[in-house]
């Protein structure tokens, strides 16, 4: 039977930083993004994986707050949260991209213009010519950068990225009319180019056309809903249009709790049929990735339970998962649900006893243990556990009865002998 060993006071759960991270992630999963952001961002200077994960999920909490503020037309607050998220992890709300960025080295583009020219001019394509122009621009060779892009236009024709780059260079020189023309062509050549729509929005905003900017940012956000910079600019444009009195409707993504990814559903179907995966995960020793690993498991179990609310096993695994995440209330709810479905479910009884003991209800815990024994858990360690609970409730006679039964089942059970001697004393 699965039982998780309790950790000593010297375990990592005693660390205040780990505690803040655990509570921050708990708040994040519950949708309390304000509290999550405050707790997790306080760990931004923490070294190692904890700090990196706290920064990421703190930013994701800010993103959720920003999206929610946009729903209520509080665009100033939305801008504040989305800007904070972008400052923390860059424009992508993507964990793998963020972690890679943490380890990437800074590149010095001003020193590579010469090498890029060697690559682009003999046989390079649009990508190489664009990179050449970027390197020349960063090296202060702005005229050469424009000339490289014009050469690319003559050589390759209707390339969206080349036109976009020309537009960006023009915008940097505050030649907004030319920038608008080039970026509009980029959009025409590739209507799904999210960056082109974004920069066309910036150019429109620079020209004072907030309505056109809002349309562009909305299209960019449709294409890349995880782009924090686009979300921030969409919020700012929406605020400007809102202040002008014009009416509009924003298309916003679903909240994280509403998103059921296909892989998660596939995994939910798998664990509904086979309990080997949750068993294996829940028997792992505690580690720094517990919140992320078991947060995923909790989400998958929630999907499975939505489809199969009458499966006692799923409720049991959900209870143990939430207990491991420190969410005792949800753990208790799922354990009770499992017992409502199957009152003779021994593991759920033992789980309920464990939860009652943690919440200082030893009398209720002892009753659940008694039920478990009646339903088949007639094992030495369970009798010793029952004796310990009954002793806390000052029911020494009943405690002695359980210890004697434990010794009957296992005569050399040292712990039972010691507990019995302690009662006699």
Image (cartoon, rainbow, N blue to C red):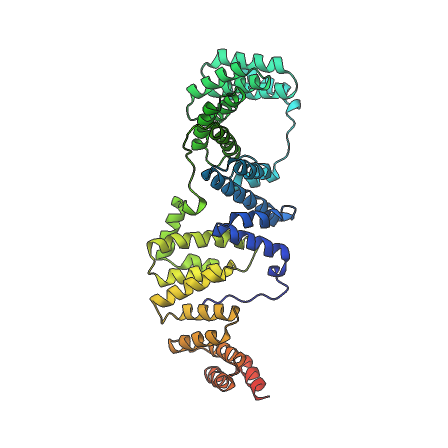
Quarter of the image where one finds residue 377: bottom left
Residue located 54% across and 16% down the image:
176
Residue 32 locus on image (x, y percent): 50, 50
Does residue 363 lie above or below 85 as drawn?
A: below
Residue located 40% across and 44% down the image:
261
Residue located 52% across and 80% down the image:
393
Quarter of the image where one finds residue 192: top left
Q: Left or right: 129 with respect to 349?
A: right
Does residue 76 lie above or below 415 as drawn?
A: above
Residue 24 locus on image (x, y percent): 55, 52
Instruction: State the residue lying farthest toward the front.
Output: 245
User: Between 103 and 62, which is closer to the camera in this rendering?
Assistant: 62
User: Between 264 and 233, which is closer to the camera in this rendering?
Assistant: 233
Does residue 351 lie above or below 219 as drawn?
A: below
The quadrant in which the C terminus is found is bottom right
Q: Is residue 168 visible?
A: yes
Q: Left or right: 268 with respect to 362?
A: left
Residue located 58% across and 53% down the image:
21
Total numbered circles: 0
Residue 326 locus on image (x, y percent): 52, 60
Q: Is residue 320 visible?
A: no
The quadrant in which the N terminus is found is bottom left
Residue 316 locus on image (x, y percent): 41, 63
User: Between 322 and 422, which is closer to the camera in this rendering?
Assistant: 322
Q: Left or right: 248 with respect to 46?
A: left
């Amino acid at each position: 039977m699965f039982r998780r060993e309790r950790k000593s006071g010297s375990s990592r759960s005693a660390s205040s930083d780990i505690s803040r991270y655990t509570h921050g992630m708990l708040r994040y999963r519950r949708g309390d993004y304000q509290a999550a952001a405050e707790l997790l961002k306080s760990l931004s200077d923490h070294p190692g994986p904890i700090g990196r994960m706290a920064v990421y999920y703190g930013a994701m909490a800010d993103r959720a707050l920003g999206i929610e503020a946009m729903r209520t037309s509080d665009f100033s607050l939305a801008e504040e949260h989305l800007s904070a998220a972008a400052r923390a992890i860059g424009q992508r709300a993507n964990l793998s991209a963020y972690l890679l960025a943490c380890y990437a080295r800074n590149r010095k583009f001003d020193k590579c213009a010469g090498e890029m020219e060697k690559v682009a001019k003999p046989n390079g394509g649009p990508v190489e010519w664009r990179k050449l122009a970027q390197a020349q621009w960063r090296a202060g060779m702005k005229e050469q950068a424009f000339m490289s892009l014009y050469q690319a236009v003559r050589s390759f024709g209707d390339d969206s990225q080349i036109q976009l780059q020309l537009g960006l260079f023009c915008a940097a020189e505050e030649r907004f009319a030319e920038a608008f023309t080039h970026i509009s062509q980029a959009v025409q050549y590739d209507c799904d180019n999210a960056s082109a729509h974004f920069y066309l929005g910036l150019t429109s905003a620079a020209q004072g056309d907030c309505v056109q900017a809002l349309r562009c940012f909305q299209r960019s956000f449709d294409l890349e809903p995880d782009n924090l910079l686009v979300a921030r600019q969409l919020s700012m444009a929406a605020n400007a249009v809102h202040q002008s009195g014009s009416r509009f409707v924003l298309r916003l993504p679903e909240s994280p709790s509403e998103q059921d990814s296909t892989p998660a559903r596939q995994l939910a179907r798998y664990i509904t049929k086979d309990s080997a995966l949750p068993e294996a995960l829940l028997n792992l020793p505690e580690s720094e990735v517990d919140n992320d690993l078991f947060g995923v498991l909790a989400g998958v179990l929630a999907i499975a339970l939505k489809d199969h609310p009458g499966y006692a096993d799923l409720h049991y695994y959900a209870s143990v998962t939430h207990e491991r995440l420190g969410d005792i209330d949800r753990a208790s709810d799922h354990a009770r649900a499992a017992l409502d479905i199957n009152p003779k479910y021994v593991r759920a009884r033992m789980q309920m006893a464990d939860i009652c003991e943690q919440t200082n209800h030893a009398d209720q815990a002892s009753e659940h243990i008694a039920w478990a024994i009646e339903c088949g858990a007639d094992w030495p360690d369970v009798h010793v556990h029952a004796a310990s609970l009954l002793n806390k409730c000052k029911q020494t006679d009943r405690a002695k009865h359980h210890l004697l039964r434990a010794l009957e089942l296992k005569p050399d059970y040292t712990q039972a002998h010691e507990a019995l001697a302690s009662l006699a004393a």
